[in-house]
Structure formats: C-alpha cells, structure tokens
Image (cartoon, rainbow, N blue to C red):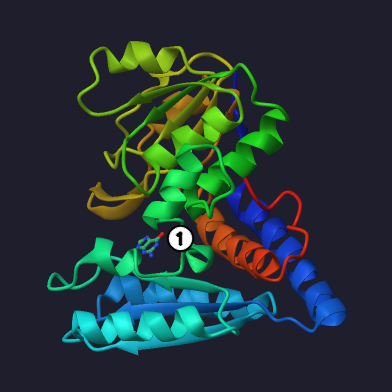
C-alpha cells in the first residue's frame, strides 16, 4: 500500500479561508473585529520568524494584530503589567506569549496570568483542566490541527485505537485528551515505553510527537493506519541541512493508509488553528455561536 499524503498546506489554507469568511461576517453583522495580541520578549531569531508569520497571517484573515516586542531585560512585573492591560482590553480576544521566555521569567506564572478566555494557546492551567475534564476549553493549536486532519480523514474516530508517542504538555497530553474526547482508545507512549514498536503496531491512529528524527519506522506501523507526524527536526544528511519528522517517512508511507509529510503536514496547521482559536474566543466573549468545524 502507498499511503495517501495528507496535504497540511492545502488543509491549513482551507481553514484560514473559513476563518476569513467568519471574520468578514462578524464585521458585517456585529461590527466586531477579532483581535490577537502576540507578546515577544527578547530577540530569539526563531521566535522572531514565528511572530512575524503570526502577524501577517492574522492580518490576512481580516483580524486585528497587536504586536508587543519587549527587550530581553524586561522584568516579570513589567510583563505581567502588559498582560493585565491586554486582559482588560476589549479589542484583544486572544493573547499569545511567545515561548521560550528568557530564563529570568517564570513561564508558568506568566502564562497563568493570561485571562483563560483569551488564552488562544490553551496553555493556562484552567484550560488544561477544562480539556482534561471534557469541558469547553481553549485547545492547544497543534493538537487541534491534528484532530481536524484526523476527523477529515476518518469522519468518526469512535472506537479506533490511537497511540500518541510523546507526553509533552503542548502536544502529547492534549492530543491524547482530544482523541479520548472523540472516543478513541488512547495509549500515551514515550521514549521510555517498553516494546514501543509493538505498542505502535496496534494503532489505527499513530501520532508521533517525541522530537527524535525518524525514530518511528515503517514496520512499527499497522497496515492502513493514519500516521500524523508532529516532529520537526533539523538534521544534516549528505552534508546538506534537511527537515525531517519523528517518522521515517519513506518506510512508513509504504505501509500506512494516510500520512502527513514533513514539511507540509502538521506544521502549517498550527497558525491556522491559532487564528481559529482567536475567532472562537471572540465569538465566546460576545455570546455568539462558535464557528462550526473549527473547534474541538
Ligand atoms: N513557541 C513555539 N511554539 C509555540 C507555541 O505554540 N506557542 C507559543 N506561545 N510559543 C511557542
């Protein structure tokens, strides 16, 4: 079998276009413009690229974008004061503090100072608890994107065996909660799991989020399974820089039913879901119906 390639770039473009349609209607019918505030502390080059992309994508779907770039020496009190102002600002529906923060700032404290209703990253402890108890939450963007692709591929996920490899707070754990919410039988595996290959072979849905280049091999994949590769690893091969996932793509694609490539799979979905979450936060803040198909 040769797997269907799930085109994340095209999928993300569809999500962004749906978001843009909702934003246009919101403006026309309610006079509302969803607004996203992104806070960057310091000059980390990768973070600067992410923040720039978020800014342009936000404007492209017709939302307001508020960028706050603060020097690396910013104190915790200064950052908390800014977040307090954004929490109180009715034009701001979503707040994202770009991670990692400089070492002298306590990320947990900072994230938990965001109004949970504006926490479009879904990292606030209240949203983690809401998701874990099956209540309406803001959901982390990358797992939300994976869920959208899986629903598109399978329709109902009920009863499927899902294995999530990786237990991070940003991807592995929320991904497992979302799959459980869609009635999968969920296993969370990780680098210390015994017989990891055997565990993976049970999966109808295999989500790889361990951060180890090409660790998951084709003979770990059940024939016909859907493989979602969240990994983005920079390696050098034959003297050239390359971007690879956590899955050995060629061998897995020969066995799987469907697979996300790297790049061009899960990656583009993250910003699309950030925009979807900002729209959702705006609708919830104003007691309006949530956009269909763009939430968990
Ligand atoms: N840095 C890398 N990925 C992310 C993300 O999804 N959210 C935030 N806030 N920072 C990040």
User: x, y (%) of residue 285?
Assistant: 65, 69
Which residue does the numbered mark 1 point to in the structure image?
A: 121
User: Is residue 127 something that shows in the picture?
Assistant: yes
| Vertical position of residue 216 compared to residue 45: above or below | above
- Residue at disc 1, CB closer than 8 Å to ligand 1: yes
User: x, y (%) of residue 31?
Assistant: 79, 84
Indicate left or right for 43 with 229 as reference. left
User: x, y (%) of residue 68?
Assistant: 40, 87
- Asked where in the image residue 26 lies, by quadrant, the reply is bottom right
- Asked where in the image residue 27 lies, by quadrant, the reply is bottom right
| Vertical position of residue 204 compared to residue 81: above or below | above
User: Is residue 229 something that shows in the picture?
Assistant: no
User: Which is nearer the eye, 87 or 4?
Assistant: 87
| Vertical position of residue 51 compared to residue 240: above or below | below
Query: What residue do we see at 53% from left, 28% from top?
Result: 180
User: Which is nearer the eye, 96 or 126?
Assistant: 126
Quadrant into which the N terminus falls: top right
**Residue extending farthest left:** 104
């Amino acid at each position: 079998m040769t797997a269907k390639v799930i085109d994340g770039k095209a999928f993300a473009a569809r999500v962004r276009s749906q978001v843009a349609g909702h934003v246009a209607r919101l403006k026309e019918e309610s006079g509302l413009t969803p607004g996203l505030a992104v806070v960057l502390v310091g000059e980390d080059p990768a973070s600067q690229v992410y923040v720039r992309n978020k800014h342009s994508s936000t404007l492209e779907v017709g939302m307001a974008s508020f960028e706050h770039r603060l020097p690396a020496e910013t104190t915790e009190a200064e950052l908390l004061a800014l977040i307090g102002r954004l929490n109180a600002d009715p034009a701001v529906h979503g707040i994202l503090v770009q991670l990692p923060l400089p070492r002298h700032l306590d990320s947990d404290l900072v994230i938990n100072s965001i109004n949970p209703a504006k926490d479009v990253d879904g990292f606030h402890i209240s949203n983690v608890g809401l998701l874990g108890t099956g209540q309406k939450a803001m959901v982390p963007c990358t797992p939300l994107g994976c869920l959208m692709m899986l629903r598109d591929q399978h329709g109902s996920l009920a009863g499927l065996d899902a294995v999530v490899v990786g237990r991070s707070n940003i991807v592995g754990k929320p991904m497992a909660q979302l799959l459980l919410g869609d009635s999968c039988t969920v296993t969370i595996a990780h680098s210390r799991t015994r017989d990891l290959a055997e565990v993976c072979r049970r999966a109808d849905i295999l989500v790889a989020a361990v951060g180890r280049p090409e660790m998951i091999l084709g003979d770990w994949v059940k024939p016909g399974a859907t493989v979602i590769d969240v990994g983005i690893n920079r390696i050098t091969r034959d003297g050239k820089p390359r971007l690879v996932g956590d899955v050995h793509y060629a061998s897995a694609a020969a066995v799987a039913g469907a697979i996300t490539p790297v790049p061009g799979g899960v990656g583009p979905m993250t910003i699309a879901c950030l925009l979807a979450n900002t729209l959702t936060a705006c609708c919830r803040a104003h007691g309006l119906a949530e956009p269909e198909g763009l939430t968990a």
